[in-house]
Amino acid sequence: MDFVQERTVMIQFDNVTVVYKNNVTGLDKVSFHIDKGEFVFLVGKTGAGKSSAIKLLTAEIKPFSGDVWLDGVKVNGLKNRKIPFHRRKIGVVFQDFRLLRDKTVYENVALAMEIVGASKKQIRTEVPNILRLVGLGQKTREYPSSLSGGEQQRVGIARALVNRPSLIIADEPTGNLDSATASSIMELFEEINRQGTTILMVTHSEKIVNDMNKRVIVLDHGMLVRDDKKGVYTIED
Amino acid sequence: MRINRPFYFLKNALKGMTRNTEMTVTAIITVTSCLLLFGVFMLLSANINFIGEQIRNQCQIQAFIEFDATSEEEMLVYSQISNLPNVSDCTFVSKADAMEEYRAYLGADASAFDGLEGEEFLRSSVKVNMNDIEKSKELEMAIAAIGNVAKVSNRQDVVQRVIDVTDVIRNASLGAMIILLLVAIFIISNTIKLSVVARKDEIHIMKYVGATASFVRRPFILEGILTGVIGGAISLVLIGFGYTYVIKFMKDFLDIFQLIPLVQILPFMVGTTLIFGVLMGAVGSAIALVKHLKV
């Protein structure tokens, strides 16, 4: 059965093991679940399995064993042609922003809507709304090169949000930003979370994890070693 | 109102072409060269067939009648030949007619025969056209067996040799055309590969936002097709001018065989070249995408 999840669960990993072609274990019998509307930090050293977890959710890889569920759908059971539609439920924010240099702020965000086949009218309404929400209402015609790092990340967040995904995966979203800018970006994420969007954030920032005081899942060598409801980032993480 | 998808893909395809202007121009020049040579071989092949038909039509058997046969006997030979199978039509050439033909052939030198009549040294003959040139040997033997037929002239051996040579040229042209198509596909594939590499960030983002594989691939396929069509169109213009010149040259200096008129072959050339341009572009792009674009 591919649709057996409870409706309150957004993400569920059931005994998931990932083994890569070179026999490296990405994840080792990992189980956890994240409810809808939660804000969760996924932390761990390089090679701990964070990227494997994200790739499983975005259906870039399949588990060697176990199942991954997202919003009631078994991700590893999806047929290839269904994967793009699955990804539309997820908004991904990258550490390096990944904006298109030859497109304006507006066009970068509109691209995400064009891809899913939104109408021109929808795009004209939604893009300015979402840019206002992230605080870039006045910068729609600017190019990424003329924006600060924080502003560029806000464009990245707007692009991830514009199709109203039920989950935002943020991969080190403040990794390239100074601490003041990082704080304002985190405030934005908190606001988005308050509006009901589930957020799974990968980070190495001890300050951010400790300041936010949210749930923390810690991976180490592919294994889940800690899952605290109101966690902190410890030196071993 | 939904986004105008065809326009969206076309816009992106054109953007892809202008992003790598140098490579795009190189690809168009290569495709033009390949399709130009392809067109030349195609014209060569078509004209060889055309000329082959003319040669076949010129292939005649001539039956010479015994010198001392009476008019009645000559008419009997004519009637027996005309009733043979594989004879499409035949013409009786009297001794006087043969003299006229000979004089016409000699032109100014014909005066050497002034005062002579054909009856004195030329034979009457029957010129025979056939339905099936392949069976000319059988017809030749059947004519030779008729009484009062002195000699049968059949140029089928020469004609067959010409046909064999044209077959070789046609097959070589076909081989060359296949090689040229493969070269063009390879070049288009490489251009699209570069275009994919140049747009890898955009493709990566599109993938994460939930673009379907066909949505990502379509602009690249279109880019390949546009390269093929532009190359095809340029090559057609060049072929049109070149062929007009060749027809004029053949008419002015080498009026042995007639070439296929441009207006007659143009629709076929346009259709074939553009279809091959589109196919080359699509196949070249598809190869590049299968190799370099995992969505």
Image: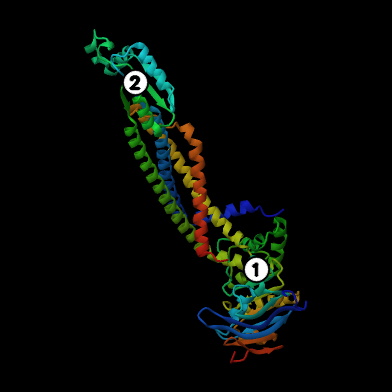
Name the residue nearer the viewer: B142 or B122: B142
Total count of labels: 2
Type of amino acid at the residue the image marks with label 2: Gly
Q: Residue at horizontal 41%, vertical 40%?
A: B45
Residue A112 horizontal/vertical position (percent): 65, 63
| Residue at image mark 1 | A79
- Residue A165 visible here: yes
Quadrant placement of the C terminus of chain B? bottom right
Q: Residue at horizontal 39%, vertical 23%?
A: B128
- Residue B195 visible here: no
**SS assignment at label 1:** loop
Specify few, some or many for label 1: CA neighbours under 10 Å numbering under 14, 14-19, or 20 or more: few
Name the residue nearer the viewer: A209 or B221: B221
Q: Residue at horizontal 72%, vertical 64%?
A: A129
Drawn side of residue B60 relative to residue B102, left or right: right
Type of amino acid at the residue the image marks with label 1: Lys
Residue B258 horizontal/vertical position (percent): 39, 29
Specify few, some or many for label 2: CA neighbours under 10 Å numbering under 14, 14-19, or 20 or more: some
The alpha-carbon separation of the residues under discs 2 and 1 comes to 85 Å
Q: Residue lying furthest right in this view?
A: A7
| Residue at image mark 2 | B147
Drawn side of residue B81 relative to residue A57, left or right: left
Examine the image and state in which quarter residue A188 appears: bottom right
Examine the image and state in which quarter residue B121 appears: top left
Q: Tell me if label 2 and label 1 are in contact, CB under 8 Å.
A: no
Residue B116 horizontal/vertical position (percent): 24, 9
Q: Residue lying furthest top in this view?
A: B115
Name the residue nearer the viewer: B131 or B44: B131
Q: Is A143 rendered above or below residue A2? A: above
